[in-house]
Image (cartoon, rainbow, N blue to C red):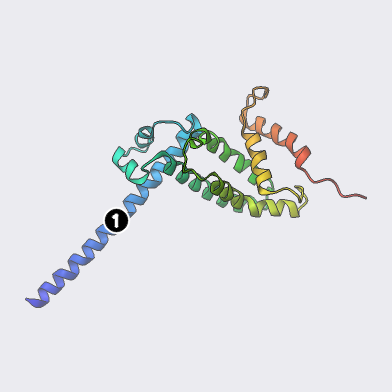
Amino acid sequence: MGVARQQFTLALAKLVKRTCQSMRKDAERNRQRLIEAASEIMRNEGGDVPMELIAERASLTRGTLYRNFPHRQAMYEAVLQNDLGMLSGQLGAQRDSDPLAFIRGMTELMMIYDKFLVSLAHMTDYDADTNQARMVAAIAAPLAAAQAEGVLHSRLTGDDILMACRMLASHWRLDTQKDPGESFNKRLDLMMRGLGAEPASQ
């Protein structure tokens, strides 16, 4: 009887462990679905969309949404961290083929991030400096590589590049290009005339 009870206890413990692991994986998947849905909506509609719309887009309940992100700031922070992580991975793969890929990637991120900066400005506990530092860190390596190749001025800082990316991400009314890609390339070309390294003296 004692052996049977011991076997039952061990089997029950394994079942509980597997159940807990499965629940954690489900929770992680749900969180990621919410982040991806929020990122998509913010790209298209800005940062002040109703939180419930994000849950609906992810096909999850409001309860699941608020368990993961009790307020809008937590959602914004998670989206930014997720997109920065994705950008860092992409930049690592593109660095050798395109030394300026990080400017394009960060500009695309700014198109999302700056859409909800207006909302974030009203949040007293929002740490703008920390997020700025995270973005600077994300582009530090590709910026250094572009400077080493002589593509960008050596005196440029990460903060300078972020400011340039915000300018590139702006929807200028005077921009006559209808295609977003052509519009970006035009803006980047104009900006590079000021950012590009001067040719070496003969």
Instruction: Using the rendered image of the protein, determine whether residue 61 is visible from the camera's viewpoint.
Output: no
State the image coordinates of residue 6 (x, y, percent, origin top left): 14, 74
Q: Is residue 1 above or below residue 30?
A: below
State the image coordinates of residue 46 (x, y, percent, origin top left): 49, 31
Q: Is residue 88 above or below residue 8?
A: above
State the image coordinates of residue 134 (x, y, percent, origin top left): 56, 50
Give the quadrant of residue 48: top left
| Depth check, front residue: 180 or 198 | 198
- Asked if residue 3 lies left or right of residue 84, the reply is left
**For the view shown, which residue lies furthest in the front direction?**
124
Instruction: Using the rendered image of the protein, determine whether residue 14 is visible from the camera's viewpoint.
Output: yes
State the image coordinates of residue 95 (x, y, percent, origin top left): 65, 52
Q: Residue at 19% across / 70% down in the picture?
A: 10
Q: Residue at 65% across / 34% down in the picture?
A: 167
Q: Residue at 76% across / 50% down in the picture?
A: 155
**For the view shown, which residue lies furthest in the right direction?**
202
Say few, some or many: other residues with alpha carbon within 10 Å of mark 1 (under 14 / 14 to 19 / 20 or more): few
**For the view shown, which residue lies furthest in the bottom direction?**
2
Give the quadrant of residue 24: bottom left
- Asked if residue 22 lies left or right of residue 169, the reply is left
Q: Residue at 51% across / 36% down in the picture?
A: 121
Q: Is residue 8 above or below residue 29?
A: below
Circle 1: element type? helix
Q: Which residue is denoted by mark 1 in the rendering? A: 22
- Asked if residue 35 lies left or right of residue 144, the reply is left
Q: Name the quarter where the N terminus is drawn.
A: bottom left
**For the view shown, which residue lies furthest in the left direction?**
1
Question: Looking at the picture, which amino acid does disc 1 mark?
Answer: Ser
